[in-house]
Image (cartoon, rainbow, N blue to C red):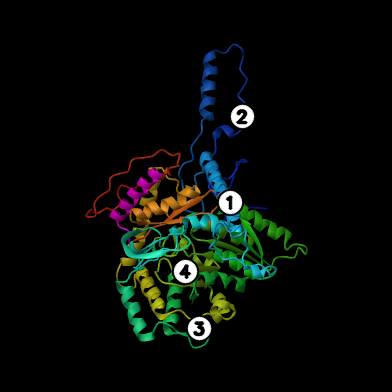
Amino acid sequence: MTKSPETQPADGDVCQRAKNGLRPERNGSAKSLRRGHERRPEPPRRSPGEGEEREADAEAAEEEEEEEVPAAPRPCGPYGRPFAESFEETPMLVAVLTYMGYGVLTVFGYLRDFLRHWKIDRCHIGREKEEQTGFVPLYQDFENFYTRNLYIRIRDNWNRPLCSVPGAKMDLMERTSRDYNWTFDYTGRVVRDVINLGSYNYLGFAENTGPCADSAAEVAAKYGVGVASTRQEIGNLDRHEEMEKLVAEFLGVESAMAFGMGFATNSMNIPALAGKGCLILSDELNHASLVLGTRLSGSTIRVFKHNNMQSLEKLLREAIVHGQPRTHRPWKKILIVVEGIYSMEGSVVRLPEVIALKKRYRAYLYLDEAHSIGALGPRGRGVVDYFGLDPCDVDVMMGTFTKSFGAAGGYIAGKRELIEYLRSHSHSAVYATSMSPPVVEQIVTSMKCIMGEDGTKIGLERVQQLALNTVYFRKRLRDMGFIIYGNQDSPVVPMMLYMPAKIGAFGREMLKRNIGVVVVGFPATPIIESRARFCLSAAHTKDVLDKALSVISEVGDLLQLKYSRHKIKPAPPRPSDGGGGAYEDVDD
């Protein structure tokens, strides 16, 4: 099978696929080559009378040739720019201790279950009544083992009630528990000015002042809050039509349609695009909404390794060669499903390579830009803008308004024929209630701000500020000695915690110091890869980031979280707010 120009790497490029039998790394890129592995021609024969000087020169040349040659930091062929992602391997000792921690928790969990069975210890979790013996179980006892014995111990780190706008800083309602997190009591006290490092407020549009809030208030006074009907009946407003035209213009496609819920945009539209006899190739770290949508479609699902183009191409080749199981008929449709930014890894999809493979094997591409739209690209147009690609190369463009736009809902965009088909075949379009008019106005106003149609450069400045915050924050954390996952330009920054006891400890210690963070553990992540996930915002100032970084370093020393084996560098001095260059000390 010959290589097409789209997938063939450039000369000297080691960023695409393995060469000379080298095994690819986790992200699918080949490891750096060594000249010592290359086959060298045999030296000419010497006469016995030649001196030792020539022999010494030959040995010196051979030693020099055996030295490792580091790969030059050049941009990969199809990207046209450096594509840097970091996934440092888990230290062996940390992995062993993490498994031991979960083992101890499991042993004590079974001991607690034994005490609950004999009514010695009280269990607050839902379970079947004794008179329901013999019925189909409503609660799977073993499946709830993790919830009642592990999750409950650190439950206070989640579901914290806010009582303010989720901006750069927020207010939290204080709560306590007298029964080890089974129930909570509110003290009536408000914890004010907590630095918010957890909300998806990438461009800072989640605010209660400014043009977006003012426009939403005006629309609420004119149209009300609810529509009380579906779009196909009498719930289609002129604001809905304007919003969809603006979304299509923003993305550079023919048409777009909006939905009231981002999760349902994936789970209810994928079944309308694929069905029995179709093949869906899904990244192993795709969001739960994508996983649910692919399962509801009834299609055959095959999973490829995260962001690994060799794994994806292998599945595509097998699908073309073998066809459907048993009958070996060609697949009706092959749909590749990926995300722009993966919300738990902070990695960016290798979109140029995905598009090249999609064209080569004549598959369709479904791109979820929930976290990347507004947060990536010089114009904030998402991962397509980030790589400078043609939006027409993506068959189905999906995104949400809940992150960068500070609103709610999602969209599907693409060719006009696709959108007209979904208007009559998507369950979310036919049966769901129309979007609230104030929410629509929030989307329209914020999107016009990003596009510059409001007559200002506020939107563009926020996109640029987010990029600067991302580079600075990631670099500082890495220099402190933390293990950071993801792409250097991703505003989603996972910091590895690993051990289960440190999940709750990190969240509590940060809140004590007025920093609100999101901690994530199993089953949302692999069992030994628990982490804290920071989400940066253009609303974060330099002083806010410096204070947060100082606290993170302090808690990291307290909990011994600086696992990285890279050399720790001292923190560079930063200019004041009054200076012209906000991040002149950062090397991009």
Picture quadrant of residue 441: bottom left
Q: Is residue 402 left or right of residue 273?
A: left
Mark 2 or mark 1: which is in front?
Answer: 1
Q: 194 or 421: nearer the eye?
A: 194
Q: Main secondary structure of the magenta part?
A: helix
Q: Residue 41 carries which label?
A: 2
Q: What stretch is highlighted in magenta?
A: 539-558
Q: Is residue 97 left or right of residue 128?
A: left
Q: Within 10 angstroms of label 2, few (less than 14), some, or many (20 or more) residues?
A: few
Q: Which of 249 and 298 is in front in this view?
A: 298
Three-letter amino acid code at disc 2? Pro
Q: Which of 561 and 537 is in front in this view?
A: 561
Disc 3 to disc 4, C-alpha distance: 19 Å
Q: Mark 4 highlights which residue? A: 400
Q: Which of marks 1 and 3 is nearer the N terminus?
A: 1
How far apart, in angstroms, are the residues tagged by discs 2 and 1?
68 Å
| Disc nearer the start of the sequence (4/2) | 2
> At numbered mark 1, what does the secondary structure look like: helix, strand or loop?
helix
The mark closer to the camera, 1 or 4, is 1
Q: Position of residue 493 (x, y in %)?
A: 43, 54
Does the magenta run of residues contain 454?
no
Q: Is residue 71 visible?
A: yes
Label pair 3/4, CB-CB below 8 angstroms: no
Q: Residue 231 carries which label?
A: 3
Give the residue displayed 51% in from the left and 15% down from the top: 53
Q: Which mark is residue 489?
A: none
Q: Which type of secondary structure does the marked residue at label 2 adopt?
A: loop
Label 1 neighbourhood size at 10 Å, few (<14), some (14-19), many (20+)? few
Distance in Å between CA atoms under marks 1 and 4: 45 Å
